[in-house]
Image (tube, rainbow, N blue to C red):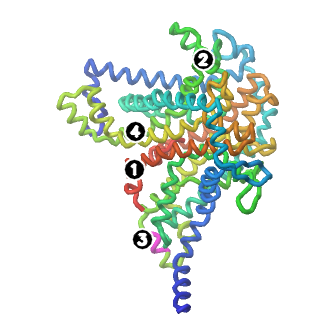
């Protein structure tokens, strides 16, 4: 207990004068950070409830003079929230399903099945872990605009977001590592009973891999949530847009441009789903970061 | 003879069938959306491509055009500025915060959640928040807060001299929480007996950080350093959305120049040439990391 309970400073030291200062500085820093992280977020919601003139007032007001929900109603209509929520949900679900499908099968093959040149295949995936992928924006766009050999264009389709979802060698290898650690006896027993590999994977391996599936799923979600750029590039027709593209359109193009409080209301609405998801899965997410060593 | 070979083949196919089948989707998507684009990018460097027409070989013309573009130097300088400032600010902040928060006994998980929350913001909302509520020179939160300390108002992203630093400030605010959480996990793995021993030998707080804490984090520090370099060299989304490279090209980055070549000038050859150069340059960092850490040996097959 005594050894594990200490940090850099021991519990006894924290009470000594010079270290009490260090310790209180740590609290102070934590408190300041918490305010500077949470206040701006609250500010978006509060500003959306203010009159446009009040948002720009100097000195700023913390609470709105009149709580005016009209901007939210206006944003709900203008941003076509129900439609966008539907599109976004479909796009994100498809993305996660596509990723899990591709990497689960491959990870299982590399972990458990007979594969020729396993080491070579493994190294090929490993070699792509740290590739600078943003730099490939243009050739990726050209590929999506005209798929090799079949010459089909995926521009303005959700397939352009779904199909590349499986390209994540890091998560593939992470999953393989997890499968490696599942006791072989479990799957051997199933195999002796004559279960097919698909069945073994579905019935034995996956139920034992819930943490890693959750991590891959959640991180897939945050990846696509943040990858606004690709969505804007690919989805040209408004009917196909996701929430992020809609929010961008209304603030950053001449076509949109409603009053500032409406823009902020639109942004506020689109913050709610990830925020709720974060608070619900908070434990998984912090564990996942630790596990993957990747940023969300 | 043929019969034996045939049997061996059928034997091999039967043995490997399921395994290969399971690998097909991954190989397919990697080939189409990663490996092929890499090759395509290198080829584009030496081609002229107009959609709908055949590609033409143009030798070094694209590279020549890119290297003689007066914007290139500007873009490189701006990008280096972003990378450098992100190293100074963005790389140090999470280490310091993680150490400080690890020393906090009560409410640590609250602080951890609080610093992580901005990571949840969809990118586009982050830009709106900062552009409309934090950066504005008069009513913006940043100048208001600095005003309390008696610091005069700054122009932030409206000023050619401050724009890159402002973007770094914003992305640090948004991203450092995830890194902090990782470092905190790393810190929890440092053996407390080492601190005990350091205390016995009379090492102070800072000495313990220097001789115990930082060495304990070293492999994580190296990994995150390389990842951060690779990602900051490719900065695109922030200047694209918030400043379109302005004011007066002072936030034009290399990737934004690539974007402009491809999607404004519709000159895919030039875009390919510049992004291929960036890609190869960043590949050096990845290779360095893999060599340093023996990533391949450590993970094993």
Residue at x 52%, y 53% (from the top left corner): A128
Q: Quadrant of residue A224?
A: top right
In the rendered structure, find residue B291 and report the number of the disc placed on it: 1
> Pointer 1 indicates a residue of which chain?
B
Q: Quadrant of residue B157?
A: top right
Dot 4, crowdedness within 10 Å: few (<14), some or many (≥20)? Answer: some
Residue at x 31%, y 33% (from the top left corner): A7
Q: Nearer the viewer, mark 2 or mark 4?
A: 4
In the rendered structure, find residue B141 and report the number of the disc placed on it: 2
Regarding mark 1 in the picture, which secondary structure is present there? helix
Q: Are marks 1 and 2 on the same chain?
A: yes
Q: Residue A189 magenta-drawn?
A: yes
Q: Is residue A45 visible?
A: no
Regarding mark 4 in the picture, which secondary structure is present there? helix
Viewer-side residue, A192 vs A174: A174
Quadrant of the drawing holding the C terminus of chain B = bottom left
Q: In x, y percent, where is residue A9? A: 28, 29
Regarding mark 2 in the picture, which secondary structure is present there? helix
In the rendered structure, find residue A185 and report the number of the disc placed on it: 3
In the rendered structure, find residue A7 and report the number of the disc placed on it: none
Residue at x 29%, y 22% (from the top left corner): A19
- If you read the primary sequence from the N terminus, does the residue marked by circle 2 or circle 4 appear first? 2
Q: CA distance from mark 3 to mark 4?
A: 38 Å
Q: CA distance from mark 2 to mark 4?
A: 32 Å
Q: In x, y percent, where is residue A64? A: 68, 16
Viewer-side residue, A152 vs A224: A152
Highlighted range, magenta: A186-190
Residue at x 49%, y 65% (from the top left corner): A110
């Amino acid at each position: 207990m005594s050894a594990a309970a200490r940090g850099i400073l021991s519990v006894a030291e924290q009470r000594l004068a010079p270290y009490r200062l260090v310790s209180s500085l740590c609290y102070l820093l934590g408190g300041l950070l918490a305010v500077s992280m949470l206040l701006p977020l609250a500010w978006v919601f509060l500003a959306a409830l203010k009159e446009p003139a009040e948002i720009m007032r100097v000195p700023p007001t913390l609470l709105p003079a009149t709580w005016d929900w009209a901007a939210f109603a206006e944003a709900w209509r203008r941003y076509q929230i129900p439609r966008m929520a539907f599109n976004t949900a479909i796009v994100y679900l498809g993305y996660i399903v596509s990723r899990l499908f591709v990497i689960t099968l491959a990870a299982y093959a590399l972990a458990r099945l007979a594969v020729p040149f396993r080491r070579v295949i493994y190294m090929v995936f490993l070699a792509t872990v740290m590739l600078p992928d943003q730099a490939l924006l243009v050739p990726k766009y050209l590929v999506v605009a005209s798929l090799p050999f079949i010459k089909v264009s995926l521009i303005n389709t959700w397939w352009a977001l779904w199909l590349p979802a499986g390209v994540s060698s890091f998560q593939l290898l992470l999953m393989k590592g997890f499968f490696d650690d599942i006791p072989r006896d479990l799957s051997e027993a199933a195999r002796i009973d004559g279960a097919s590999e698909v069945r073994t994977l579905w019935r034995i391996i996956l139920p034992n891999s819930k943490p890693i599936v959750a991590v891959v799923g959640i991180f897939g979600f945050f990846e696509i949530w943040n990858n606004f750029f690709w969505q804007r590039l690919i989805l040209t027709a408004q009917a196909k847009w996701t929430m992020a593209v809609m929010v961008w359109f209304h603030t950053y193009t001449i076509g949109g441009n409603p009053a500032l409080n409406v823009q902020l209301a639109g942004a506020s609405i689109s913050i709610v789903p990830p925020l709720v998801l974060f608070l619900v899965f908070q434990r998984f997410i912090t564990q996942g970061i630790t596990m993957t060593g990747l940023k969300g | 003879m043929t019969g034996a070979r045939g049997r061996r083949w059928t034997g091999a196919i039967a043995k490997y069938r399921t395994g290969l089948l399971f690998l097909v989707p991954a190989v397919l998507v990697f080939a189409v959306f990663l490996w092929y684009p890499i090759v395509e990018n290198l080829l584009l460097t030496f081609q002229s491509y107009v959609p709908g027409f055949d590609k033409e070989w143009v030798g070094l013309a694209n590279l020549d055009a890119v290297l003689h573009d007066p914007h290139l130097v500007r873009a490189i300088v701006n990008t280096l500025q972003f990378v450098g400032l992100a190293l100074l600010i963005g790389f140090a902040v999470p280490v310091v915060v993680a150490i400080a928060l690890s020393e906090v006994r009560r409410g640590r998980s609250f602080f951890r959640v609080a610093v992580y929350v901005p990571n949840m913001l969809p990118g586009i909302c982050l830009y709106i928040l900062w552009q409309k509520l934090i950066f504005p020179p008069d009513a913006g939160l940043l100048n208001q807060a600095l005003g309390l300390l008696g610091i005069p108002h700054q122009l932030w992203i409206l000023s050619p001299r401050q724009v890159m630093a402002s973007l770094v400030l914003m992305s640090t605010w948004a991203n450092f929480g995830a890194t902090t959480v990782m470092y905190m996990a790393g810190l929890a793995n440092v053996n407390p007996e080492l601190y005990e021993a350091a205390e016995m030998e009379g090492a102070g707080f800072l000495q313990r950080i220097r001789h115990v804490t930082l060495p304990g984090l070293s492999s994580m520090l190296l990994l995150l350093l390389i990842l951060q370099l690779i990602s900051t060299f490719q900065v695109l989304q922030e200047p694209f959305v918030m400043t379109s490279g302005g004011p007066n090209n002072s936030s034009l980055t290399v990737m934004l120049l690539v974007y402009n070549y491809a999607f404004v000038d519709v000159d895919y050859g030039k875009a390919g040439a510049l992004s291929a150069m960036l890609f190869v340059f960043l590949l050096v960092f990845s290779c360095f990391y893999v060599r340093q850490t023996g990533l391949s040996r450590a993970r094993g097959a």
